[in-house]
Image (cartoon, rainbow, N blue to C red):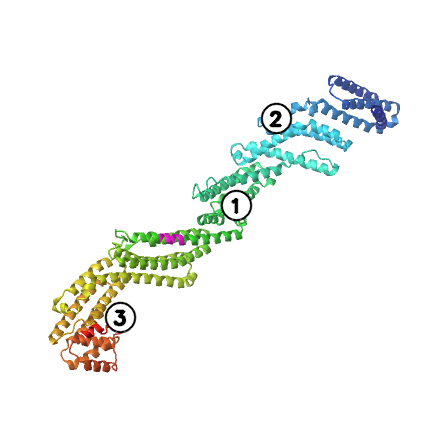
Amino acid sequence: STMEETDREAVATAVQRVAGMLQRPDQLDKVEQYRRREARKKASVEARLKVQSSINLSVCVITRRCLIFHFCFLLLHFHPGSFKHSYFLLLSCIYYFYFYYVVLLGVVFFPFFAFLSVPEIVRETQDLIERGELLQAHRKLMDLECSRDNLMYEQYRMDSKNTHDMNLIHTYFGDMQKLSEELAKQLWMVVQRSLVTVRRDPTLLVSVVRIIEREEKIDRRMLDRKKQTGFIPPGRPKKWKEKMFNILERTVSTRIEGTQADTRESDKMWLVRHLEIIRKYVLDDLLVAKTLLDQCFPPHYDIFNKLLNMYHQALSTRMQELAAEDLEANEIVSLLTWVLNTYKSAEMMGNPELSPEVDVNSLDPLISQNVVEQLLSKYMSTLTSNIIGWLRKALETDKKDWIKETEPEADQDGYYQTTLPAIVFQMFEQNLQVAAQINEELKTKVLLLCLQQMNSFLTRYKDEAQFYKEEHLKNRQYPQCYVQYMIAVINNCQTFKESIISLKRKYLKTDMEDTLSISHTSMDATLDIIAKEGCSSLLDEVFMDLEPHLNELMTKKWLMGSNAVGTICVTVEDYFNDFARIKKPYKKTMTIEAHRRVVVEYIRAIMLKRISFKNAEERKEGAEIMIKEAEQFRFLFKKLAAGSGEDTEGLCDIIEAIAEVIKLTDPSLLYLEVSTLVSKYPDIRDDHIAALLTVRGDASRDMKQTIIETLDQGPSQPNPNYVPIFKEITVPTLTVPKLLK
């Protein structure tokens, strides 16, 4: 039977082990002593067996081992030469006795031979964990683990393939594994809150670090033993130090991610707030880590630098996540400003209190250059669309003002203006200031973009001003303040010019001037066209009102005594009261142009041949009226041009020179008078001379022909400042109805 085989095996083993147990002759005297001790153990085991009826065959093994001990000593008594073999047999029996005593009878041997049951120790350890007495709890846990691990090691040495006994030990100490996990859970809770704990209870954190250090030592010891024997207890190595750093890493990541309290839907400034909270948290945490946390860890943990790397990595991950979102232009700028500037500034990693441990120059970029360029490209694309939209909206808003029934606002000097230039350049300024936060290159790109879009915008502005004029001409009563708003449009041109210069001076490097010179010239030209067309449209207003009075000039009514020129002067002066609100460069141009057009219209009235003087008296009377009216014009425009320094004498001189031709009483001197006129104003054409002679009323067809042909051969001596005026004046030809008359 199996039992008989076991007995035979035990006897054979006992003979061999007792034979080798004692190697020195003097130990033979103690054989009887050994025999009595083993007999007592046998009796003790048998008594225990009676109490614990649940113990099975394994207890029998213990009993048999004890019988083997007894047998060994008997063997030694009768065969002293088997000392060495009996010695090893005895050691084996002692081990098995210890193993089964602990496992099957629930007893653990502690120092000083204190005997406690495993469940009781587990309960005590659990209580210590719950009370937060972690060091004491860990000490008891280590004792439990030490007992288990030694038993397992001895079992492994005796019979490495005996999984049954190994499992028996493992099962018996099963609650101990839960204890280890529970203690670890408490440790990780402290580690997660280490930056808070270190301020409130640094001792607790130090205890946790001590426990981790103990476990690291045990890990190393167990790994060394594994190299030598191949045995390692279950659950080893625990790697609690590595787990601690993993916990810290996850805690840092969670802290960074958890700072986003808002979304774009709930708060347009969500990203700015998110980044500011991150900045504050990271700086505070690192300052605590440097000043307090560093003292709670052994130097070889290098805890501050480890944490610094964790924060840097967590920030890098978070910034890349944000960069991958569908960010708006202002959000891209906020992100890039934070990543490229704020992060390494004195407000964060460059804080003097973090020095010298933190060297901003050695920190890797939070996001790659490739991602930065992608964001910048997206920003420029989005900004381009935004600027186009903003400019369009600004112009639409401005156009609504043009049809108001109230006058536009005036600046501090009283010049009419609208808010358009201020809105446009405020928007440009904001975007340039934002771009400047990132870097110089982006600032320059944004400036170029602004000016490029400004160029396109001014073309639309010109078209809208033209459309405004055309709509007004359909009904001159509407808009009510057309003149005032057209003045504002003209003034805006000057404001735009000044703002462009100011913007370039503020944001453009000198070496970039050439890049923008063509663009600037183009904008200036467009603005001049808008202003010129605006001035022209205002003068059109004036001359539309003057038309009935201009039609009276050089007529019978005029000759008999008309106040047409007086009315013309009053009307022009009245308009120029409004035109005083035009800024200087354009106002000066306006005055010159008004003067010129009045003279042109007056000469045109002469060339229309609405009157032909009948005699010398009428010619004299008409000429004197012309001279008098030329003087009225001269006085008016001198008054209007006051302070401009512009010489306006020359234009009215033309009227007087024509009056002299008409006034001449001696026909023989007519050629000389006409030739003098032509030499001064060489753009006078033959039809002008023919019309002038027709108005005189005393020149025959042949005389006209002779004078004209002779003049063609004469020299001209024009005033070098003379601007051709006759080329604008068309002389009407005879029509069929006129011939019939």
Disc number at residue 321? Answer: 1
Question: Crowding near pointer 1: few (<14 within 10 Å), some, many (20+)?
Answer: few
Label ID, residue 728: 3
Q: CA distance from mark 2 to mark 1?
A: 43 Å
Residue 357 visible to the viewer: no
Nearer mark to the viewer, of 3 and 2: 3
Q: Is residue 548 left or right of residue 367?
A: left
Crowding at label 3, few (<14), some or many (≥20) Cα neighbours within 10 Å?
Answer: few
Amino acid residing under circle 3: Glu
Stretch in magenta: 388-394
Pick the residue in front: 1 or 704: 704
Q: Residue 54: horizontal and vertical position, in percent? A: 73, 20
Mark 1 residue type: Glu
* Label 2 neighbour load within 10 Å: few <14, some 14-19, many 20+: many
Label 2 or label 1, whichever comes before in sequence order: 2
Question: Magenta stretch containing residue 61, yes or no?
Answer: no
**CA separation, marks 3 and 1?**
70 Å
- Residue 165: x and y in percent read 75, 29
Quarter residue 160 falls in: top right
Q: Which quadrant: the C terminus?
A: bottom left
- Which residue: 57% across, 28% down? 132
Q: Is residue 595 left or right of residue 174?
A: left
Is the N terminus in the top left, top right, bottom left or bottom right quadrant?
top right
Residue 687: x and y, percent? 23, 76
Helix, strand or loop at label 1? It is: helix
> What residue is shown with label 2?
126
Name the amino acid, label 2: Gln
CA gap between label 3 and label 2 equals: 111 Å
Q: Nearer the viewer, mark 3 or mark 1?
A: 3
- Residue displayed at 34% across by 53% down: 396
Q: Which mark is residue 340?
A: none
Q: Residue 418: x and y, percent?
A: 30, 53
